[in-house]
């Protein structure tokens, strides 16, 4: 049973391992759609602890080993399910990390003149790895028609606990815009 | 690029092209731990036997050469047919129990750049041998993964077979494929699992009748 969070809603995460799944359909013809899931592990100053704590297609694992990518799918494959995943092991997260921001972006969106509104059956979801229960899910095609980058949600510390907040902030600048903001 | 990164930053937001002159499919899993309830009562728990398989497909998405008896000498590379007649696709050999779960226990290597023009697509499949009769599925096996590595040794994609609950009851997965893309090749992850324990069921969809 999925909880479809509206912006700003929060859930407690009393979980050991969660997964961010990104899926989309391949282009019927023309240029491929290449969607990427990335994570910024952010400290108390609002910036990534270091480049090693930015998990993206050229850095598939964070320095503390807590966030790991399944790899870079450049076409959307033909899977009905997730085409790319980021798995998060809560216990391994570096103690200096205050929040983990999950983003989804379109690679080379400028040259290919692409935005989420064109990508069929695109979604991003976050779920409990053990029972596949979804904490949150966005339909990217409908919700973000002109954007090429989305801050999809964040995991953050509150007291000794981790919570998840759905964000859904869209941007037009691709991953570059977010790197400028958080690195 | 529209971005100006600060000095000393090493973040590279360009994707390097994968070197698909060669692709290696690696399959790893952990040996079944002894003991447990059955072990205590003297019963024997069956091992997990995972198999990596490659199907070479022609321009019609079919297996052109089905070889002799039981696919020997065919365009299907598996535990009984470890080397393709061209010598350009080869299997490291059948591991029937697994290993540490840290490194590849079976590998299939395809020398894509030399492959004859007749071959257009190669599908990679992983199955649990006799998994249905042994009532096994991917979800039960510790540290099971399948991965694709390019010609530079860079891992392109990896599925953890043990962690995804959607693999319950499934003993065969189409892991991914490589297809011709102009003069080069393109790898795609697929990840579709099926409730069968034989890659033959997948191969049957690609036979000339």
Image (cartoon, coloured by chain):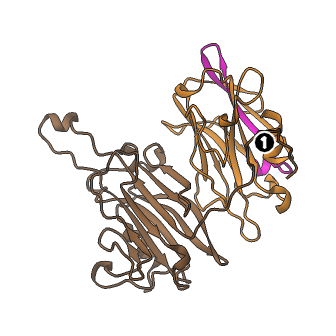
Residue A176 versus residue A73: which sits nearer the camera? A176
Where is residue B190 shown, x and y percent of the image?
55, 60
Q: Is residue B137 above or below residue A111?
A: above
Callout 1 secondary element = strand
Residue at the front extreme of this rendering: B8
Chain under callout 1 = A
Q: Residue at x 47, y 71 (%)?
A: B110
Asked if one can make out residue A1 in the rendered structure from this viewpoint, the answer is no
* In the image: residue A113, left or right of residue B128: right
Residue at the left extreme of this rendering: B42
Task: Determine which quarter of the picture holds residue A42.
Answer: top right
Q: Can residue A164 be found in the magenta stretch?
A: yes
Q: Is residue B133 above or below residue A105?
A: below
Highlighted range, magenta = A140-165
Where is residue A41 shown, x and y percent of the image?
68, 31
Q: Is residue B50 above or below residue A29?
A: above
Q: Residue at x 63, y 56 (%)?
A: A73
* In the image: residue A178, left or right of residue B119: right
Where is residue A159 shown, x and y percent of the image?
64, 13
Query: What is the drawing colour of chain B?
Result: brown
Asked if one can make out residue B131 in the rendered structure from this viewpoint, the answer is yes
Q: Residue at x 32, y 64 (%)?
A: B93
The residue where tag 1 is placed is A150
Q: Residue at x 83, y 35 (%)?
A: A181
Query: What is the drawing colour of chain A?
Result: orange
């Amino acid at each position: 049973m999925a909880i479809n969070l509206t912006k700003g809603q929060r859930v407690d995460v009393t979980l050991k391992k969660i997964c961010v799944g990104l899926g989309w359909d391949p282009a019927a013809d023309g240029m491929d759609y290449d969607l990427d899931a990335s994570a910024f592990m952010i400290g108390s100053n609002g910036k990534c602890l270091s480049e090693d704590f930015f998990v993206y297609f050229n850095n598939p694992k964070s320095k503390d080993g807590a966030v790991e990518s399944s790899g870079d799918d450049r076409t959307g494959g033909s899977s009905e399910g997730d085409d790319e995943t980021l798995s998060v092991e809560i216990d391994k997260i570096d103690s200096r990390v205050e929040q983990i921001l999950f983003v989804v972006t379109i690679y080379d969106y400028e040259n290919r003149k692409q935005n989420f509104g064109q990508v069929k059956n695109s979604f991003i979801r976050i779920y409990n790895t053990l029972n596949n229960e979804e904490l949150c899910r966005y339909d990217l095609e409908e919700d973000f028609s002109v954007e090429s980058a989305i801050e999809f949600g964040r995991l953050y510390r509150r007291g000794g606990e981790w919570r998840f907040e759905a964000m859904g902030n869209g941007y037009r600048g691709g991953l570059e815009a977010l790197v400028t903001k958080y690195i | 690029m529209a971005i100006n990164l600060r000095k000393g930053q090493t973040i590279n937001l360009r994707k390097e092209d994968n070197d698909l002159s060669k692709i290696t499919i690696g399959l790893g899993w952990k040996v079944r731990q002894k003991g447990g309830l059955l072990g205590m009562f003297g019963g024997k728990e069956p091992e997990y036997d995972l198999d990596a398989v490659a199907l070479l497909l022609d321009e019609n998405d079919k297996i052109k050469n089905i070889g002799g008896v039981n696919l020997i000498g065919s365009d299907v590379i598996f535990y009984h047919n470890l080397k393709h007649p061209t010598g350009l696709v080869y299997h490291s050999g059948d591991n029937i129990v697994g290993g540490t779960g840290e490194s590849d226990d079976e590998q299939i290597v395809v020398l894509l750049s030399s492959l004859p023009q007749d071959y257009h697509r190669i599908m990679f499949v992983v199955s649990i041998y006799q998994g249905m009769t042994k009532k096994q599925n991917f979800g039960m096996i510790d540290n099971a993964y399948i991965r694709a590595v390019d010609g530079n040794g860079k891992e392109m994609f990896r599925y953890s077979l043990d962690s995804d609950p959607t693999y319950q009851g499934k003993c065969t997965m189409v892991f991914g494929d490589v297809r011709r893309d102009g003069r080069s090749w393109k790898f795609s992850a697929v990840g579709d699992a099926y409730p069968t324990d034989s890659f033959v069921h997948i191969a049957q969809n690609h036979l000339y009748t």
